[in-house]
Amino acid sequence: MKDELAIAIRAVRQMKGLSFEAMSGAATQNSLSLIEGAKIHPSLPTLLKLAQSLDISVLTLLALSLGVRDGNSPKDQLHSALKEVENFIKADGLLLIEGQIKNGVMVKRPRGTTADAERVQAVLDLKRQGKTQAAIARELGLPPTTVRRYWLRDS
């Protein structure tokens, strides 16, 4: 998405006739140049500042970028997102969000679940078959870090 974000940011900045100097509150001129040149990804806080300095919603900026990526219109991206939000709300997702906040602070989640013995064994079996960690991660649909952790149990 580096290229797509660069394209959208550059286009909005040019459309609004803004210079790098006018956006200096969002990032340094060097960083803006690197972002618009698709050399670096902006962090989410930087992306929020860029959108603010462009006087555009970060959601709009992302819709423009995703439209470039997917070869469709930003409106299509937003309609799709709206359907997802509606489904989230229908499934009581907002209640789940509310349950993650207590007294205005995010609730800490409990520690992760203990290792599934079957998954550990599957990783170790595939390791013994000579498969790489990356191949095992793909085959079992596990994160590479989980495979690495299980892999080391056989040492």
Image: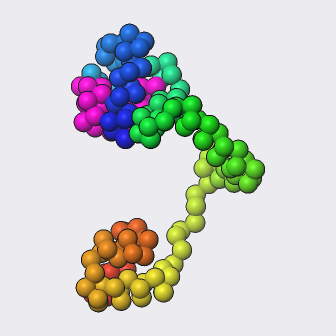
Residue 79 horizontal side relative to residue 73, left or right: right
**Spot occupied by residue 77 in the image (x, y as percentages of width and height):** 55, 37
Q: Which residues are magenta?
A: 30-51
Q: Is residue 109 magenta?
A: no
Q: Quadrant of residue 120?
A: bottom left
Q: Residue at x 51, y 22 (%)?
A: 56
**Spot occupied by residue 55 in the image (x, y as percentages of width and height):** 49, 18
**Spot occupied by residue 105 in the image (x, y as percentages of width and height):** 62, 46
Residue 65 horizontal side relative to residue 101, left or right: left
Quadrant in the picture for the C terminus? bottom left
Q: Quadrant of residue 68?
A: top left
Residue 72 horizontal side relative to residue 30, left or right: right
Of residue 82 and residue 109, the one placed in the foreground of this image is 82
Q: Residue at x 34, y 85 (%)?
A: 126
Does residue 149 show up? no
In the image, residue 140 above or below residue 10 = below
Q: Residue at x 50, y 82 (%)?
A: 116
Q: Is residue 33 magenta?
A: yes
Tell me, what colour scheme is on the image?
rainbow
Of residue 110 and residue 116, the one placed in the foreground of this image is 116
In the image, residue 135 above or below residue 17 = below
Instruction: Report the magenta stretch's main SS.
Output: helix
In the image, residue 101 above or below residue 148 = above
In the picture as drawn, the residue positioned furthest to the top comes out as: 17
